[in-house]
Image (spheres, rainbow, N blue to C red):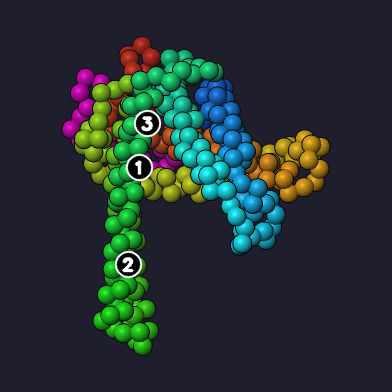
Amino acid sequence: MAAPPERPLRNVPIFRTVGQALSMMFGNLGSLLRAAAFPALLSLLIGLAQWYFLPPEMRGLLLEEGASLDGAEVELQAFHWSQGLGVLSVVPYVFFAVAWHRVLLMGPEAGRPALLPAWKTRHWVFLGYLVVTAIIFLAVMSVPGILMGMGSIGITKILGQEQLAGQGAAGLVVGLGVLLMVVVGLSLWLRLTLVLPARAVDERFGLKHAWRIGRGQGWRLLVINFLMTIISLFVAMIAAIPLVLALYVPAALIWGFTTEASFFVGSLSQVFLGYPITALFVGVLSIAFRTVSGWVPSAQNPGPPAPA
């Protein structure tokens, strides 16, 4: 786009956006598989590396029901290595999110994902904005927690430990106030995340532009993401049954009917189910960005239509 608009051109429709995110995913399964193939492999390799560095005591805790680390000497260096490798999980996410944004915004042909993608400048920029928005999210979410703690301490000092009924009522008021702040904070943060699809398609677009075109859209994105979470949980519950059965047979042949086989199948299922679910939330951002900005890649290949 020549210049991002100063305000949203249209409001993001709630139910239509949810429906379109679902139809875009199921209507582009080939592109989804291409976009997710390499990131899913990376996720599996990172998971295996984490498991390799995990101390035996921690493995036992994960594999054996009721296992405890009390009195055990955990190899902290190995544990830190395992936790540090978890940070790398953001890399496959960036690969996938950028690829899927480009498919949905540019169309399956112009935005065709590479089976073996290269890490480009757009990935660095996308990662940078992802980190910045994550820091903003953590900062915003820390405020309600701090205020709730301060409110609880203040209520206890004013009412005293004996007046439990009054303390409980006042605590409920503080809790509702904190919940309201969380909702407001999430909606403001989601407004800023509109920068991510723009950077995935190489637009010169920053947080100030996202803030402008996201005016009044934060609460809509919050409701949409809430609905998408419910749908994702429902779909995951249904898909998990045949997926786990399909994976457990070869796992049982390798390890037998052991907790290790169950843990392996569970980890693999999370990867296989995680990318389609991630595609839905990435799709919501793509649709929202196109709707509020009116963005099109070109007159010849306008990509999927934005909801009216």
Looking at the image, residue 27 sits to the left or right of residue 8; the answer is right
**For mark 2, does the 10 Å Cα neighbourhood hold few (<14), some (14 to 19), or many (20 or more) residues?**
few
Dot 3, how many residues are within 10 Å of its Cα: few (below 14), some (14-19), or many (20+)?
many
Indicate whether residue 113 is drawn in magenta.
no
Q: Which residue is mark 3?
A: 127
State the mark number for residue 34: none
**Quarter of the rendering occupied by the N terminus:** top left
Please tell me which of labels 1 and 3 falls first in the chain: 3
> What is the three-letter code of the residue carrying label 2?
Gly
Question: Which residues are the magenta region?
Answer: 1-19
Question: Residue most toward the bottom?
Answer: 162
CA separation in Å, label 1 and label 3? 10 Å
Residue 72 quadrant: bottom right
What residue is disc 2 on?
149
Residue bearing the label numbered 1: 134
Residue 152 horizontal/vertical position (percent): 32, 72
Q: Residue 116, position in %: x, y?
A: 53, 18
**What whole-number distance in Å separates the C-alpha atoms at marks 2 and 1?**
23 Å
- Residue 153 falls in which quadrant of the image? bottom left
Given residues 245 and 302, the one toward you in this image is 245
Q: Amino acid at mark 1?
A: Ala
Residue drawn at point x = 29 percent, y = 22 percent: 203
* Side of 245 where 5 appears, left or right: left
Q: Report, in whole angstroms, how far the alpha carbon at label 2 lies from the one at label 3.
A: 33 Å
Label total for image? 3
Name the secondary structure under disc 2.
helix
Mainly helix, strand or loop, the magenta region? Answer: loop
User: Where is 73 relative to 147, above or below?
Assistant: above
Say which of 206 and 184 sits in front. Answer: 206
In front of the other: 16 or 196: 196
| Residue at (57% x, 48% y) in the render | 75
- Residue 110 lies, in percent from the top left, at 43, 14
